[in-house]
Image: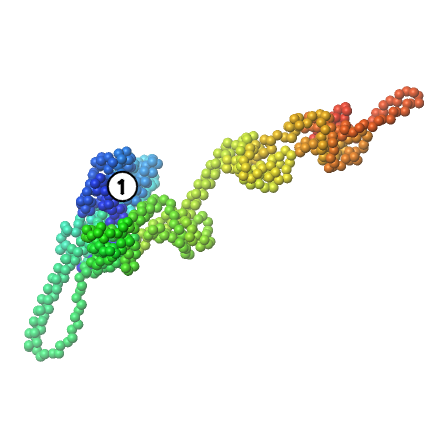
């Protein structure tokens, strides 16, 4: 008999976590909500510890501890437990938790939830509690949906549902719906792998044994799948309640087990099959002996009647070995274990160096070093009475000699929780340990992580070596897990791109708000970020505005830093808003007093000032009293003597003293006189006329520039502005 044992057998991680929690919890005040797993032997072992099973949360006393099994519970249970002071040990499977999140978010978005699964299964009941029990549950391929006209639909599946059946149900639903539905494939990858392997084994074998609890959903699915491929499929709740004699007529038998089936039960099945195989072998040997004896007797009779012939050498054929021995020997081979695998071993002896243990499906002992035990201090006496007990171990390395650890189990459990979170899209980090032609590599626990070159960041990355030793922020694109490897294909680019898009969206929104609320004339506060030779860029509510150098000072400046300092905050006036081109011009000087505004406070008619000649014109000279204030010395106010042109007496740059003769700050005018500060020379009397009559005053002919200074008052004071003078000059041209 040839035996094929499924590689994916024994507890899944979710089930193992729940069982481990129940076996380690404080038994006196701990309760399990429902069956921890669908396996009576395991449930009995937990109850023998004193951990009690209850059917409702109301049966758990206030202040006690409750274990939520891997199937999950309704959302309201968490709030109720908290309100009653009940400590929760949440063993919800990561895949179930992911499905709960999808149901909750999609329901909140207003979608109708459809759950593909068994209506009475605890996982499905728990999922209902995440959408206020409004979900439609379907488990038939030809189910007819109620009217969902105009409603958005979200479909999830029970994590242990048949993949093939789920796809057929989805196809049927889409035929009934014109509107596209959102389909989430929430069947866990462990279930998918077991179902695929069951199908392959059933196609290859004459008979198949399916080991697992009769009420286990995933085990029932394995039975259904195997039955479609093989005519002789047997269901075993345990190794004891089965007639193995039925297998004598089959040349090949396959063994598959559900996620709630302990390795010990599978081994027990194999040992029972070994007994049957031994009986078959003994029967075959007896029959062979009888045939041999008959043949020998016949030969003796023939030898008497015939002449004796030389005996020929006979080569003894190797007797066929028991096929079951090959299976068990293979199972005893340490190479069957995988790195990161959880196994259940048996303690056979406690020594000073550690524990001698018997591996599952093995008859040989190995030493588990005391350093790998989950204890603060190793004491032989503490383990003396534990001989024969089961112990959970993690396979650290499969290279001979195999390395096992108990203390690293917690790390593995934490890793699986993290993997469940990563599967849901949570960001994680690794340190890049190297690179190859295709991208970057690293590790996360027992998983290899690969980041394709195109997924490192937006844009092309030429030099991969610069990332070695750097921390990468990643999001999983694909998680691969089979018998040979555990790998995560991840991307950093999606995170960076999302953040970039978020920044740009926030910036756009901020700009929109900024331009919606800013107007010409507004007074704003801004921080000087940088300066140029033409102005300063000022941050106003995070938006860059330009303060041109001409709008910084009334007196004119050579450098921006003469007025503004980088990093400091000032008040500015909004001068121009260009919403189309996203530009804003602001001014600083517009909020500062002009020199002429203070002139009335600083100067008065009759004051003597000291200034510099800054410009000479035909009708006079302009003297800079201070920055921004120029006064005019008319040509008639330069000297008591008549002069032809101001340039004949004054030069640009000359410093002079002058008396303020007139002041009009509003008109920005100041009339000055130099001659008023000079002593007046004695005038010679006019000679009388020969006829004795008084000589009439000679009228001066109009000067060429009289039109330019027609607004001058008697006494030589000017009332025109420089702008008026220049304008008249332009007209003359």
In the displayed structure, would residue 710 be above or below residue 35?
Answer: above
Quarter of the image for residue 706 reads top right
User: 676 and 336: which one is in front?
Assistant: 676
Is residue 593 toward the left or the right of residue 706 in the image? left
Is residue 521 toward the left or the right of residue 662 in the image? left
Quarter of the image for residue 666 reads top right
Which residue is found at the position 32% from the left and 38% from the top?
104
Which residue is found at the position 65% from the left and 29% from the top?
596
Which residue is found at the position 18% from the left and 44% from the top?
48
User: 109 and 258: which one is in front?
Assistant: 258
Q: Residues within 10 Å of mark 1 (few under 14, many from 20)?
A: some
In the displayed structure, would residue 662 be above or below residue 135?
Answer: above
Is residue 519 toward the left or the right of residue 100 in the image? right
Residue 210: x and y, percent? 20, 51
Residue 639 visible at all: yes
Is residue 632 toward the left or the right of residue 260 in the image? right
Residue of label 1: 89
Residue 162: x and y, percent? 26, 47
Farthest residue toward the top? 693
Residue 696: x and y, percent? 87, 22
Quarter holding the C terminus is: top right
Which residue is found at the position 84% from the left and 25% from the top?
699
Quarter of the image for residue 685 reads top right
Residue 116 visible at all: no
Residue 626: x and y, percent? 68, 32
């Amino acid at each position: 008999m040839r035996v094929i044992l499924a590689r994916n057998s024994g507890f899944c991680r979710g089930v193992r976590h729940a069982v481990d929690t129940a076996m380690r919890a404080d038994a006196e005040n701990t309760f399990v909500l429902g069956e921890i797993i669908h396996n009576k032997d395991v449930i009995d072992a937990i109850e023998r510890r004193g951990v009690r099973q209850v059917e409702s949360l109301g049966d758990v006393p206030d202040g006690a501890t409750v274990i939520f099994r891997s199937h999950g519970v309704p959302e309201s249970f968490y709030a109720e437990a908290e309100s009653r002071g009940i400590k929760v040990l949440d063993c919800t499977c990561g895949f179930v938790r992911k499905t709960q999140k999808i149901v909750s978010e999609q329901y909140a978005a207003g979608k109708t939830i459809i759950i593909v699964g068994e209506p009475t299964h605890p996982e499905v009941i728990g999922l209902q509690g995440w959408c206020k029990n409004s979900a439609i549950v379907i488990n038939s391929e030809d189910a007819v949906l109620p009217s969902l006209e105009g409603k958005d639909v979200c479909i999830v599946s029970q994590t242990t549902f048949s993949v093939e059946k789920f796809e057929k149900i989805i196809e049927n639903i889409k035929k009934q719906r014109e509107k596209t539905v959102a389909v989430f494939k929430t069947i866990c990858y462990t279930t998918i792998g077991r179902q695929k392997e069951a199908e392959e084994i059933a196609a290859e074998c004459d008979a198949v044994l399916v080991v697992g609890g009769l009420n286990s959903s995933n085990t029932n699915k394995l039975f259904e799948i195997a039955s479609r491929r093989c005519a002789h499929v047997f269901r075993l709740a345990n190794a004891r309640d089965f007639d193995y004699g039925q297998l004598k007529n089959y040349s090949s038998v396959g063994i598959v087990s559900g996620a709630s089936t302990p390795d010990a039960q599978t081994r027990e099945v194999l040992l029972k099959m070994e007994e049957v195989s031994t009986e078959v072998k003994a029967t075959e040997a007896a029959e062979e002996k009888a045939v041999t004896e008959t043949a020998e007797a016949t030969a003796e009779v023939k030898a008497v009647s015939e002449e004796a012939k030389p005996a020929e050498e006979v080569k003894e054929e190797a007797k066929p070995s028991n096929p079951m021995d090959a299976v068990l020997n293979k199972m005893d081979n340490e190479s069957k274990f995988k790195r990161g695998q959880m196994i259940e071993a048996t303690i056979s002896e406690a020594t000073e160096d550690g524990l001698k243990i018997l591996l599952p499906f093995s008859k040989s002992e190995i030493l588990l070093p005391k350093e790998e035990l989950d204890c603060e201090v190793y004491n032989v006496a503490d383990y003396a009475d534990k001989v024969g007990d089961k112990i959970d171990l993690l396979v650290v390395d499969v290279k001979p000699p195999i390395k096992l650890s108990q203390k690293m189990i917690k790390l593995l459990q934490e890793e699986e929780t993290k993997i469940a979170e990563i599967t849901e899209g949570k960001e994680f980090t690794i340190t890049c340990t190297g690179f190859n032609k295709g991208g970057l590599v690293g590790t996360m626990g027992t998983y290899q992580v690969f980041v394709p070159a195109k997924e490192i960041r937006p844009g092309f990355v030429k030099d991969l070596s610069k990332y070695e030793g750097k921390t990468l922020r990643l999001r999983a694109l694909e998680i691969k897990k089979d018998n040979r490897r555990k790998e995560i294909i991840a991307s950093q680019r999606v995170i960076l791109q999302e953040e970039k898009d978020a920044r740009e969206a926030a910036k756009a929104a901020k700009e929109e708000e900024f331009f919606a609320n800013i107007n010409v004339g507004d007074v704003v506060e801004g921080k000087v970020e940088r300066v140029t030779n033409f102005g300063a860029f000022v941050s106003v509510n995070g938006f860059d505005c330009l303060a041109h150098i001409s709008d910084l000072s009334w007196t004119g400046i050579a450098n921006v830093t003469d007025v503004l300092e980088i990093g400091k905050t000032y008040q500015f006036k909004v001068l121009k808003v260009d919403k189309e081109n996203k530009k804003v011009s602001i001014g600083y000087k517009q909020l500062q007093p002009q020199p002429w505004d203070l002139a009335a406070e600083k100067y008065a008619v009759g004051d003597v000032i000291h200034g510099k000649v800054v410009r000479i014109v035909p009708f006079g000279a302009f003297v800079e009293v201070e920055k921004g204030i120029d006064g005019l010395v008319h040509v008639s106010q330069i000297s008591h003597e008549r002069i032809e042109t101001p340039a004949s007496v004054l030069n640009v740059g000359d410093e002079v003293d002058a008396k303020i003769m007139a002041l009009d700050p509003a008109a920005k005018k100041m009339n000055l006189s130099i001659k008023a500060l000079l002593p007046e020379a004695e005038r010679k009397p006019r000679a009388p006329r020969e006829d004795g009559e008084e000589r009439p005053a000679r009228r001066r002919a109009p000067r060429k520039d009289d039109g330019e200074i027609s607004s001058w008052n008697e006494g030589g004071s000017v009332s025109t502005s420089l702008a008026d003078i220049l304008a008249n000059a332009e007209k003359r041209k």
